[in-house]
Every structure is written in C-alpha cells, then in structure tokens.
Image: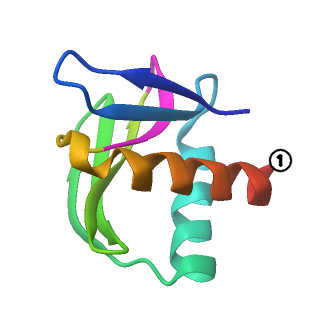
Amino acid sequence: MSYLLTTAQGSLEAVIDDNCGMKKFLNIANTLSDELAINFSNKFDNSDSVDWMFLYKGHLLTLHYNIYNGVSICSDDSKHNDAVNELARLLEQRLY
C-alpha cells in the first residue's frame, strides 16, 4: 500500500513501495508504459538512485527509485499533487 509524504515546498511524494529493488521499479515503469501509455522523456540514472520523468494528463511527474527509500512518484510543483495522488492510487490497484 502506498503512502504520501509532503515536502517543505508543499508538493507530494507518493511512496509506492519503500522496501524493494530495481526489479520492482522496472515493473512499475512497465505498468505505466503498457497500461497507461506513458512515455518517459528524461532518464537520470545514478549509482544509488534513478529518476525517470514523464507526462501524466499534462502534469510533469517523476518516477523515482532510491536503494534506501524504494519507489515513489513525485513532482517539484504542488500544483501536480492531485495527479501524483491519482496515479499512486491507480498503481496501487494494478500492483497489489
């Protein structure tokens, strides 16, 4: 089950799974791509974290993976909070 965190700037981060590996991240990315026709535009891969950006209903969001914190969906702007929350709920229904 996912849960929501709020940043100091007021934007949401929806934690999809806080105890998982890269395989789960790729499973979530495939679900977004296959079932919701999402295309990832920018992909930033580091040794301990991955950020893949995408548009969802006109909102710029990020699929984030960190080896310590798991997989989450977030945005840098609080005006995208509803989209983050909606997408987290959709993923929760499809993955669990």
Q: Is residue 23 magenta?
A: no
Classify residue 16 as left or right of residue 73: right
Q: Position of residue 24 (x, y in %)?
A: 62, 46
- Camera-side residue of 56 and 19: 56
Q: Position of residue 28 (x, y in %)?
A: 59, 56
Q: Going 27% across and 64% down the picture, which residue do you hit?
A: 59
- Camera-side residue of 40 and 86: 86
Instruction: Answer above or below: position of 94 versus 6.
Output: below
Mark 1 highlights which residue?
96
Q: Quadrant of residue 61?
A: bottom left
The amino acid marked with disc number 1 is Tyr
Instruction: Answer above or below: position of 36 versus 59.
Output: below
Segment tinted magenta in the rendering = 67-74
Q: Going 42% across and 56% down the picture, which residue do you hit?
A: 83
Q: Going 36% across and 78% down the picture, which residue do you hit?
A: 39
Name the colour scheme. rainbow
Q: Position of residue 49 (x, y in %)?
A: 31, 33
Classify residue 9 as left or right of residue 37: left
Placement of the N terminus among the 4 image quadrants: top right
**Magenta stretch, main secondary structure class:** strand
Local packing at callout 1 (Cα closer than 10 Å; few below 14, some 14-19, many 20+) is few
- Camera-side residue of 3 and 16: 3
Instruction: Answer above or below: position of 45 versus 67.
Output: below
Classify residue 63 as left or right of residue 94: left
Callout 1: SS: loop
Q: Going 53% across and 56% down the picture, which residue do you hit?
A: 87
The total of numbered circles placed on residues is 1
